Image: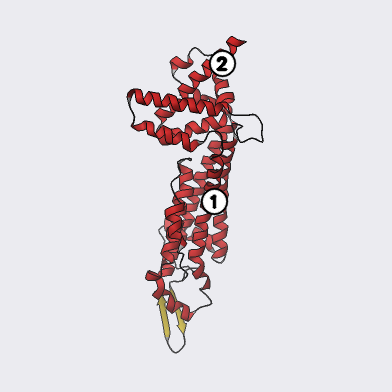
Amino acid sequence: MIGVRFLTDYVQRIVQVSVVGDFVVGLNYYVTSMLLAFFSIAVSSKQYFGSQIQSWEHAREDHISYYRWVPIMLALQALCFFIPNWMWSAVHRHTTIMPEVFISAAVKCKNMHGEDRNAELKTIAKSMHGAIKAFRREKVSLSTGETATVAYLATKFAFLVIVAIQFFLMNYFLGGTYLNWCSTTIGAILHGNEWNESPIFPRVMANIQRHTVQCVLMLNMINEKIYLFLFAWFIFIGVSTAINFLYNLAIVVLRPMAISSIVSQLDEDVVSSCPARHTTKFVKKYLRADGVLLLRFIGSNAGDGIARELLNELFVMFKAENSNERAVV
């Protein structure tokens, strides 16, 4: 078997939990990538599977040549789920909102109390205010106020496309009958019927020469379980990602939905004296899509309480700035 030695370094150094994303991004980028890497390492391990495959190779070398590529294929699948998040990380670090910086600062406030905590939150809010004011209207700029949001949506859509590709990739790799076998097998399991042996993963091989030789293939039994699990897992990931993508798209496209969500988090004493058009302007012209996205990231990592306090601080700054502008006029 071909060892996949680079996977150990891949798992330890490259695949790390990303704070700039939601639960579904973590399922795609981290959990799925780690699962595929683990399966690749397990299948490629000569220590456990070397002797079992030898007897099969002597009997039918032509039939199982593609089995040698199973760990390589699983490793490539793991890399597929790494690429979208890598591209997302490369983009968001150059956007105006710099989510990693603000998330890190907000998380520190979780363990702070009293005046120190309030002072730190005000400092973060002032920095966020400065970043938000840097939004520009030019579409060629990385500071439009929508750049990070568009890139984030593109990342989720890329994960959705990659999940769909996995089904075609595995079906082609395993001879074109993989999808039909998975559907039939899962249907049999759900109806309590016997799990029949698959021609894709034969468990016993009989080769009649002077006598009959039967080789029980532990590796095939493991591959069978892995690929059946991956079929179910990718369905789960695909449905979850599709729903999540549509929800995030709705927040961007349906502005009243975003406005209602933000306004509901503002303190009553802060927003009571403001007309509705001011809160609408606060969301659409001030925060914009990227500001809303940044607050969501902060809420996911530092807690909804901290995100809400920062939101109210930003609204107070927004009101003061608008009052000054009206006074000048």
**Quadrant in the picture for the C terminus:** top right
Q: Horizontal placement of 282 versus 303: left or right?
A: right
> Can residue 209 be seen here?
yes
As displayed, is residue 305 above or below residue 279? below
Numbered label tally: 2
- On the rendered structure, is 10 left or right of 114? right
Secondary structure at badge 1 equals helix
> Whole-percent x and y of residue 304?
41, 30
SS at mark 2? Answer: helix
Q: Residue shown at 42%/54% (left/top)?
A: 12
Question: Which mark, by number, is residue 304?
Answer: none
Q: Is residue 216 above or below residue 182?
A: below
The residue singled out by tag 1 in the image is 83
Q: Do the residues labelled 1 and 2 touch (CB within 8 Å)?
A: no
At label 1, counting other C-alpha atoms closer than 10 Å, the crowd grade (few under 14, some 14-19, many 20 or more) is some
Q: Image quarter for residue 37?
A: bottom left
Q: Position of residue 231 (x, y in %)?
A: 49, 56
In front: 5, or 227?
5
Q: What residue type is labelled 1?
A: Ile
Q: Can residue 195 be seen in this view?
A: no
Q: Residues within 10 Å of mark 2 (few under 14, many from 20)?
A: few
Q: Nearer the viewer, residue 72 or 5?
A: 5
Residue 135 in the figure: left or right of residue 29:
right
Q: Earlier in the sequence, mark 1 or mark 2?
A: 1
Q: Of circles 1 and 2, which is in front?
A: 2
Choose between 39 and 130: the one closer to the eye: 130
Mark 2 = which residue?
322
Question: Does residue 179 lie above or below 87 as drawn?
Answer: below
Instruction: State how the image is colored.
Output: secondary structure
Q: Position of residue 292 (x, y in %)?
A: 52, 30
